Image (cartoon, rainbow, N blue to C red):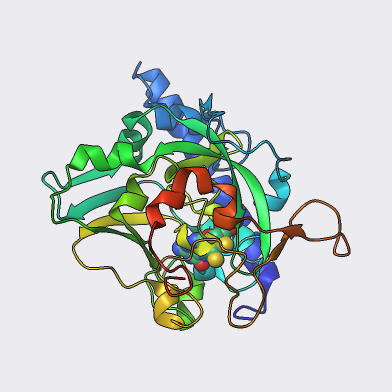
Amino acid sequence: MLFKDSKILSSDITSKAIFENRRQLIKQAAAGAYGLALAPWFSRTAFANSPGLGKLKVMKSDKYSSKEEITPQKDATSYNNYYEFGLNKDEPVERAQRLQTKPWTLTVEGLVKKPMTFDMDALLKLAPLEERIYRLRCVEGWSMVIPWDGYSLSKLIEKVEPLGSAKFVEFITLADPKQMPGLNNRVLEWPYREGLRMDEAMNPLTLLSLGMYGEVLPKQNGAPVRIIVPWKYGFKSGKSIVKIRFTEQQPATSWNMAAAREYGFYSNVNPTVDHPRWSQATERRIGSGNLFSPKIKTEMFNGYGEYVANLYTGMDLRKNY
Ligand code: MTE
């Protein structure tokens, strides 16, 4: 345990959340008094139904959505991997509440014609938000079915006009020791970094997510903006990203740097290639059944083969794990 006194921590967080909520209300009143139009991001958060969260306007996306039973929201928002806030699944829900997500900017740079920095308003306006119900399969052997709210990352990529020399995309997430107690732990090299090949990043399934369950992303799930790559193990889906960089060389990624034999660059969900320390043939669905319920068979590419298998034609997926 990194922090023993979680009681002090949670009361600290509660008072901060209330304080932030009050500040929002004061801002809202001030904007109203001067007859200002509220920005979409602001007006959504102003009508929050819980501290820091707000409803999003989303369209259903049946084409890519799973028909499986959706994981209860309370499970998806309380059983998390977010090592910057601790190694235990129940830590991010408490500790991530200290994360300051406003203001936030996402800088897109590297081998592009038009490097840009987006604030959250700009990201919200960039394309209509879709609800995509995706399976998230963690490399540890559990899975969830989550309605993410966002749009294809390709929409953002098109805006910055990558150069022909751009072959990979690197995602860099926030690393702020003042806000993230988990950075004291050297289990990973910070900031948490992930990457995709350009064609993977351009695949319509790859989502820039700004919300889940029709609400702004909770902090423990990677607020205010994260990547979701549903045919890959969950660790490829970086949370709270601050930078996207286009590169010629394959970028170094945090889990690969920590244990190259266990976590490859590709990390496609693959029931036939075991993790060196456990099988990947089956998974436990969080929020349904109990510990004794039979496990579900893991599907190749997490069930998204029809959309992505062609990206790997001719590649040995045992070597490129
Ligand atoms: N992103 C950051 N920045 N830090 C992390 O520790 N964990 C990854 C991924 N993204 C992680 C991260 C892992 S291992 C998984 S399985 C998913 O986030 C979990 O996402 P969830 O908590 O929203 O289910």
Taking the view exactly as shown, the residue that stands out farthest to the front is 314
In the picture, measured across the screen, residue 136 lies left or right of residue 191, that is right
Whether 13 is drawn above or below 189: the answer is: above
Image location of residue 191, percent across then percent down: 37, 70
Taking the view exactly as shown, the residue that stands out farthest to the top is 35
Image location of residue 26, percent across then percent down: 47, 33
Query: Is residue 82 in view?
Result: no
> Residue at 24% of width from left, 57% of height from top?
245
Residue toward you, 71 or 308: 308
Query: Is residue 186 in view?
Result: yes
> Residue at 26% of width from left, 43% of height from top?
157
Quadrant hosting residue 251: bottom left
> Residue at 46% of width from left, 67% of height from top?
317
In the picture, measured across the screen, residue 173 lies left or right of residue 283, that is left
Whether 88 is drawn above or below 21: the answer is: below
Taking the view exactly as shown, the residue that stands out farthest to the right is 292
In the picture, measured across the screen, residue 135 lies left or right of residue 305, that is right
Residue toward you, 84 or 274: 274
Question: Which quarter of the rendered picture does the N terminus lie within?
Answer: bottom right
Image location of residue 120, percent across then percent down: 35, 40
Image location of residue 47, percent across then percent down: 55, 28
In the picture, measured across the screen, residue 13 lies left or right of residue 319, that is right
> Residue at 22% of width from left, 37% of height from top?
159
Whether 8 is drawn above or below 310: the answer is: below
